[in-house]
Image (cartoon, coloured by chain):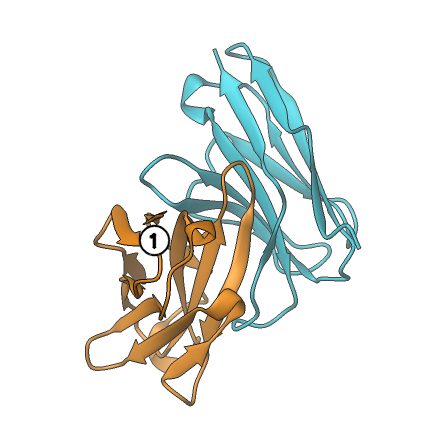
Amino acid sequence: NAGVTQTPKFQVLKTGQSMTLQCAQDMNHNSMYWYRQDPGMGLRLIYYSASEGTTDKGEVPNGYNVSRLNKREFSLRLESAAPSQTSVYFCASSSSGRYNEQFFGPGTRLTVL
Amino acid sequence: AQSVAQPEDQVNVAEGNPLTVKCTYSVSGNPYLFWYVQYPNRGLQFLLKYITGDNLVKGSYGFEAEFNKSQTSFHLKKPSALVSDSALYFCAVRDDGGISSGSARQLTFGSGTQLTVLP
């Protein structure tokens, strides 16, 4: 089992460029999440998908879009990158249910110049 | 709204001594509480959770946490720290979605506590 995988690991963009972060899980989980991690702020939820075919906004959705491609894959797109989106992005997945723990990918470190 | 506070940005402890990483929370309903650990340049790893029942929860790597409803706390503890325990620790909370809690809410993370165990 690979668990949760993310690509790429590192990315540098110029302001205004676009890119898609990819995430896949092989644990047959229904729920998937995208977080950003900034120093001193913990993890903040960008978007989540409770099940295949549904997506919902989290705490900080502005500037991002998501696609739940199938049960395994959940992508995050930055249409026009801004320096404020410089961060480390984590994808996670979990079984359905409020009390189930989330499993995290290794992260993508994104720098926007 | 639900929230989590980790009052200490940094905790230092000598190897072999007991360690405590503090966490307090606020939710409308009953809490589901989690601890995660993050090693450098890695994703978060689940340590333990409290759902209901016994207030003392045991988790991975010898860690445990004590749920205290009256103090709204969920402190992480370990009787004897190891240098390899040095990492960033996150507390997280989610309410149980009961009648009093309003709309469904996702997991909310604290800001993290950097634990350094000194040899």
- Picture coordinates of residue A94 (x, y %)? 63, 62
Chain that the image shows in orange: B
Mark 1 burial class by Cα count in 10 Å: few <14, some 14-19, many 20+: many
Q: Residue at x 46, y 24 (%)?
A: A86
Query: In the displayed structure, would residue A69 be above or below residue B97?
Result: above
A57 on left or right of A55: left
Query: In the displayed structure, would residue A67 be above or below residue B93?
Result: above
Residue at the farthest bottom position: B53
Query: In the displayed structure, would residue A113 be above or below residue B36?
Result: above
**Numbered marks: total:** 1
Name the amino acid type tagged 1: Gly
A40 on left or right of B71: right
Q: Residue at x 37, y 73 (%)?
A: B65
Give me the chain letter of mark 1: B
> Color used for chain A?
cyan
Q: Nearer the viewer, residue B38 or B3?
A: B38
Which residue is identified by label 1? B110
Q: Residue at x 33, y 77 (%)?
A: B66
Which quadrant of the figure contains the N terminus of chain B? bottom left
- Picture coordinates of residue A5 (x, y %)? 71, 43
- Picture coordinates of residue B52 (x, y %)? 43, 85
Judge whether residue B1 can be spotted in this image: no
- Picture coordinates of residue A61 (x, y %)? 48, 39
